[in-house]
Amino acid sequence: MANICLILEFDGTAYAGWQVQANGISVQQVVESTLAQLIGVPVRLISSGRTDAGVHARGMVVNFHTDRSLPPSAYREGLNRLLPRDIAVREARQVADDFHARFAARGKWYRYTLCLTPVRSPLHGRYSWQLRAPLDISAMSAAARHLVGVHDFAAFRTAGCDARTTTREIFSLDILPAEPLLQIDVRGSGFLRNMVRVMVGTLVEVGLGKRTPENISLLLRGEGQRAGRTAPPQGLCLMEVWY
């Protein structure tokens, strides 16, 4: 029995998120059905996490066990011939029997992309949150420093989060201008439901002058403050998972 690990890249625009669900077609559903077509038996993928509807990935990690004796390259090439154009296998390899894509993960890197133009951009709109007002990048960077470290991020999750604890560690949070884009790179041990998108929405409010950088500390201490809006899904991409 082989344990095969796949690294997936996908455009999440057309999907109801990663996880199989009743209200729409998911990325997991498409990959599992394509894999079953390739090897002739049903397969259930173990993923490094979930992505919401409209969220993209460059480095979603999954694994599955199979008794089919195919070389890893056959999974990559075979799946890429059969998958739709908005999903691809970037890498396939055999891993240790006890490797688990979710429980073995040590950290994740997410990138959120903003597009700062006075006129909407058809080219960037599918993969960014378009804002027409200028942002104070210095204030956003000052606010971001409050989020780095081990904190209780209860204020930065949305309804339906079933995490047993809300304490997480943010390793780094970098704000990178790349005109007309602004990229927000967040690396951490793990994330609550919509945590990155709420963090981005809050940082944008700082950039717009609607709250101060120091307000972030109040949110982390749970002092009756409300975080900013949840940023739209299309700007978010799962870049990498570490093991």
Image (cartoon, rainbow, N blue to C red):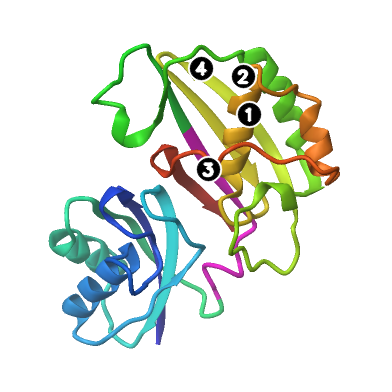
In the image, residue 106 lies in the stretch drawn in magenta: yes
User: How far apart are the two marked residues, 4 and 1, measured between alpha carbons?
Assistant: 14 Å
Q: Earlier in the sequence, mark 1 or mark 3?
A: 3
**Residue type indicated by callout 1:** Leu
Q: Position of residue 150 (x, y in %)?
A: 81, 47
Q: Earlier in the sequence, mark 3 or mark 4?
A: 3
Q: Which residues are magenta?
A: 99-112
- Which of discs 3 and 2 lies nearer the camera? The answer is 2
Q: Is residue 212 left or right of residue 193?
A: right
What residue is rendered at 34% in x and 51% in y?
A: 9
**Residue type indicated by callout 2:** Gly
User: How far apart are the two marked residues, 4 and 2, measured between alpha carbons?
Assistant: 13 Å
Q: Which one is nearer the viewer's eye here, 45 or 38?
A: 45
Quadrant of residue 235 in the image? top left
Q: Which residue is mark 4?
A: 177
Q: Position of residue 238 (x, y in %)?
A: 47, 47
- Label 2 Cα crowd, 10 Å radius (few <14 / some 14-19 / many 20+): many
The disc at residue 96 is none
Q: Does dot 3 land on a helix, a strand or a loop? A: strand
Q: Which residue is mark 2?
A: 207
Can you name the residue that lies furthest to the left here? 81
User: How far apart are the two marked residues, 1 and 3, measured between alpha carbons?
Assistant: 15 Å
The disc at residue 110 is 3
Q: Which residue is mark 1?
A: 203
- Which of discs 4 and 2 lies nearer the camera? The answer is 2
Q: Is residue 103 left or right of residue 24?
A: right
Q: Is residue 133 above or below residue 74?
A: above
Q: Is residue 231 above or below residue 53?
A: above
What residue is rendered at 56% in x and 79% in y?
A: 98
**Residue type indicated by callout 3:** Tyr
